[in-house]
Image (cartoon, rainbow, N blue to C red):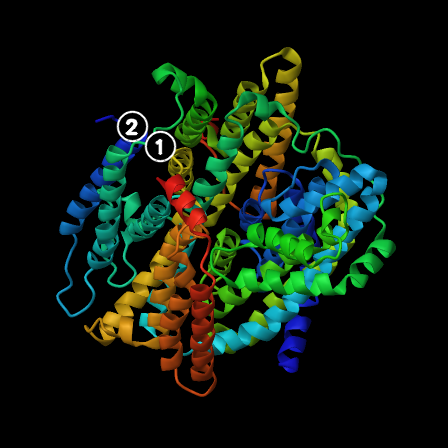
């Protein structure tokens, strides 16, 4: 038996189904004759479990879709390096948003991402800084002043 | 109807709405022109700007973006050979060769005018057919709506992926996502796993932007070399569109124009089949109908008219079903439905009769947007040429930020940006694993409708037999069943014997619920379906395919 990509996906799907099915047991049941809140999720989970099982069995019996060979974990990381870093940058942007706010955090996020994707030469840093300040600033201004949206200001602005 | 159209027209005919629509069309054209930037993404990005508008203003703007996006794809397709959107893939087959022959102005003109006429025909059909379909929709009971949603999901799941199981799993995951949070029926929290923010569930927009736009943008820059490339290649140059010559060329090809437009409308009505399919189908039909099919691919004007007329007309077809039944058939109409819901417009069979002025204002805005698209193409062409010089990574970084800004503006809560992030990760992982995204999104959109319909039907009666005894419900269940088998049928067609009998036998089975619908017309249609199916069955039995082909096919399958 080979542990292929699809086998892992099948197991994860079954675990997901199990977790959600167990969670339906904790749902409240209405005391009067209405559809219980757990019924619809269970109706979804039943075929999802069956299909996940079929998916897993097919992956075990006929491991055709093993996924492209990326050359081990490091090869896999190198292949997906750009999206992983971009997701991480976005994650940091979200974590720091309560402190930096949408404007400062947004400018920093766009600037760092532009430099990561486009390069760190002096000319590029200047260009990326200008792009991030102008485009983030312009959109922030439209939302704040024209559309009246109160965007996260950031705690650093509360200390004068 | 004329009174309603006039009333809707007067609601729409304000300078403010026209200005918004012009901006929307412009934004749609620019977005459509950028390769890799889909219409759905354009609609999603413009949506937050409409939050502060009235329903008519906001919806007219969204319609304008939709129409602009559909037409924008032809610019890059013709000038660079890289279609701006999948809706314009077939346009490049003849548009790009014609541009290379030094007739880019004519090619663009023909594309623009074909888009305009296709869109106009689609708009007229929309205004005529949507109210009629809504009347049929009024016959639907909760059982029928539930089965209709199931059918929409199964057909999307089976057509969106080569692997039906992956498509179905994706659709069910979408339905499951829709169950997280407080249930609409009883108000009890579900799947919050002890966390407070999950009690409210996920807003539709962050889920959609995360799954679709966020994951796609990061997929586009995965390859660093690709990220550094210009958006539309290096070869785009602004040219003067030859409007007069092009309009005459399109009108002299009125047969192709009409056929492609109607084909586009028909494809739009079908769930899961959007302009991505219609433009290629129309091109194929135009080639088959042509007296000079060998000229297709070398710069034949018919090869530009057909896909461009079809893709714009498809929008009309897709809007018919969405407005009349409240069920989106593809990703763009799913986004449009989200836009309507945000503006407190809930499409349903009774919506057109309950809110006729608003409904017709939406239809009219689709119609008017086609005229705006025609006028703005020349201006956006110059802008498009400038935009093609931008590097992909720059657009990605800035749009990721705009996405977060847009979803925050929906409810003013940071949790929505977190939702965007996590669903972006989920969408990226699922794309990488070969799971289609469209069924997940449709599942997330339609999950609420399905659950409400199920709850209503169970509130009426505990009996489940109406799902199989009510004609419309049975009709949709059978169609859903067929859609699951359809990929297997396509795979074995021409190589095995059973597909020869699939269509006729299925037509006979499908005739049963049509006959059960009663009245005069529908039983007659059912009888005709049976007669045609029997004729097809006899013909297939007489003309058996070559055995060697079947055996070879079976061997290939093994």
Contact, mark 1 vs mark 2 (Cβ under 8 Å): yes
- Disc ID at residue A131: none
Please tell me how crowded label 1 is: few (under 14), some (14-19), or many (20+) other residues with Cα within 10 Å.
Answer: some
For image coordinates 35% across by 66% down, the residue present is B478
Of helix, strand and loop, which one carries label 2?
Answer: loop
- Please give the chain letter of the residue carrying mark 1: A
Image check: B286 left or right of A97? right
**Pointer 1: what residue?**
A65
Q: Is residue B228 visible?
A: yes
Task: Report x, y in % for residue B170.
Answer: 36, 46
Question: Which of the 4 image quarters holds residue A11?
Answer: top left
Q: Nearer the viewer, residue B186 or A52?
A: A52
Q: CA distance from mark 1 to mark 2?
A: 8 Å
For image coordinates 40% across by 37% down, the residue present is B434
Task: Report x, y in % for residue A99.
Answer: 42, 28
Q: Residue furthest top?
A: A122
**Pointer 2: what residue?**
A4
Q: Quadrant of the C terminus of chain B?
A: top left
Of helix, strand and loop, which one carries label 1?
Answer: loop
For image coordinates 18% across by 42% down, the residue present is A18
Q: Note whether B335 is above or below B316 in the view shown.
A: above
Q: Note whether B79 is above or below B442 in the view shown.
A: above
Image check: B307 left or right of B54? right
Q: How many marks?
A: 2
Image check: B375 left or right of A153? right
Please tell me how crowded label 2 is: few (under 14), some (14-19), or many (20+) other residues with Cα within 10 Å.
Answer: some
């Amino acid at each position: 038996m080979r542990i292929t990509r699809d086998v892992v996906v099948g197991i994860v799907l079954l675990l997901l189904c199990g977790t959600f099915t167990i969670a339906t047991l904790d749902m409240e049941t209405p005391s009067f004759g209405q559809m219980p809140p757990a019924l619809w999720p269970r109706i979804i989970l039943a075929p999802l479990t069956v299909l996940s099982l079929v998916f897993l069995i097919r992956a075990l019996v006929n491991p055709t879709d093993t996924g492209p060979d990326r050359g081990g974990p490091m090869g896999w990381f190198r292949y997906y390096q750009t999206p992983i870093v971009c997701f991480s940058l976005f994650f940091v942007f979200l974590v720091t948003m309560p402190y930096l706010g949408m404007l400062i955090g947004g400018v920093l996020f766009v600037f760092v991402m532009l430099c990561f994707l486009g390069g760190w030469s002096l000319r590029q840093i200047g260009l990326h800084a200008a792009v991030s300040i102008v485009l983030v600033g312009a959109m922030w201004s439209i939302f704040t002043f024209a559309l009246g949206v109160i965007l996260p200001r950031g705690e650093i602005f509360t200390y004068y | 109807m004329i009174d309603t159209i006039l009333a809707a027209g007067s609601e729409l005919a304000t300078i403010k709405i026209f200005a918004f629509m012009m901006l929307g069309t412009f934004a749609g054209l620019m977005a459509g022109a950028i390769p890799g930037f889909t219409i759905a993404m354009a609609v999603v990005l413009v949506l937050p700007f409409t939050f502060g508008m009235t329903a008519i203003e906001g919806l007219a703007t969204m319609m304008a973006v939709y129409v602009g996006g559909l037409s924008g794809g032809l610019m890059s397709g013709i000038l660079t050979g890289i279609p701006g959107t999948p809706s314009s893939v077939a346009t490049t087959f003849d548009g790009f060769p014609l541009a290379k022959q030094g007739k880019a102005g004519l090619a663009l003109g023909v594309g623009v005018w074909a888009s305009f006429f296709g869109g106009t025909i689609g708009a007229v059909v929309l205004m005529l057919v949507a109210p009629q379909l809504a009347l049929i929709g009024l016959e639907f009971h909760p059982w029928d709506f539930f089965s209709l949603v199931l059918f929409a999901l199964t057909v999307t799941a089976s057509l969106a992926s080569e692997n039906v199981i992956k498509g179905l799993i994706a659709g069910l995951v979408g339905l499951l996502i829709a169950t997280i949070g407080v249930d609409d029926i009883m108000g009890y929290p579900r799947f919050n796993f002890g966390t407070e923010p999950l009690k409210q569930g996920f807003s539709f927009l962050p889920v959609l932007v995360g799954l679709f736009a966020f994951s796609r943008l990061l997929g586009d820059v995965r390859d660093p070399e690709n990220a550094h490339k210009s958006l539309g290649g290096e070869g785009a140059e602004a040219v003067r569109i030859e409007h007069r010559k092009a309009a005459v060329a399109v009108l002299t090809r009125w047969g192709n124009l009409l056929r492609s437009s109607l084909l586009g409308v028909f494809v739009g009505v079908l769930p899961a089949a959007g302009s991505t399919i219609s433009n290629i189908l129309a091109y194929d039909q135009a080639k088959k109908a042509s007296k000079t099919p060998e000229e297709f691919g070398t710069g034949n004007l018919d090869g530009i008219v057909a896909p461009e007329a079809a893709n714009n007309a498809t929008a009309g077809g897709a809007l018919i079903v969405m407005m009349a039944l409240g069920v989106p058939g593809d990703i763009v109409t799913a986004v449009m439905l989200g836009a309507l819901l945000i503006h407190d417009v809930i499409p349903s069979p009774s919506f057109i009769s309950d809110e006729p002025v608003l409904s017709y204002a939406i239809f009219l805005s689709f119609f008017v947007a086609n005229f705006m698209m025609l006028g703005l193409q020349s201006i956006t062409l110059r802008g498009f040429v400038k935009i093609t010089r931008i590097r992909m990574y720059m657009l990605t970084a800035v749009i990721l930020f705009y996405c977060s800004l847009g979803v925050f503006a929906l409810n003013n809560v940071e949790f929505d940006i977190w939702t965007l992030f996590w669903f972006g990760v989920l969408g990226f992982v699922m794309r990488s694993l070969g799971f289609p995204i469209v069924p997940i999104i449709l599942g997330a959109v339609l999950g609420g409708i399905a659950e409400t319909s199920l709850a209503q039907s169970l509130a009426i009666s505990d009996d489940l037999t109406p799902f199989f005894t009510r004609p419309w419900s049975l009709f949709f269940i059978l169609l859903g069943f067929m859609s699951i088998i359809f990929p297997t049928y396509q795979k074995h067609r021409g190589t095995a014997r059973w597909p020869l009998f699939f269509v006729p036998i299925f037509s006979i089975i499908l005739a049963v619920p049509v006959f059960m619908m009663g009245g005069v017309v529908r039983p007659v249609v059912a009888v005709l379906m049976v007669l045609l199916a029997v004729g097809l069955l006899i013909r297939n039995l007489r003309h058996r395919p070559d055995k060697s082909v079947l055996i070879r096919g079976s061997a290939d399958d093994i």
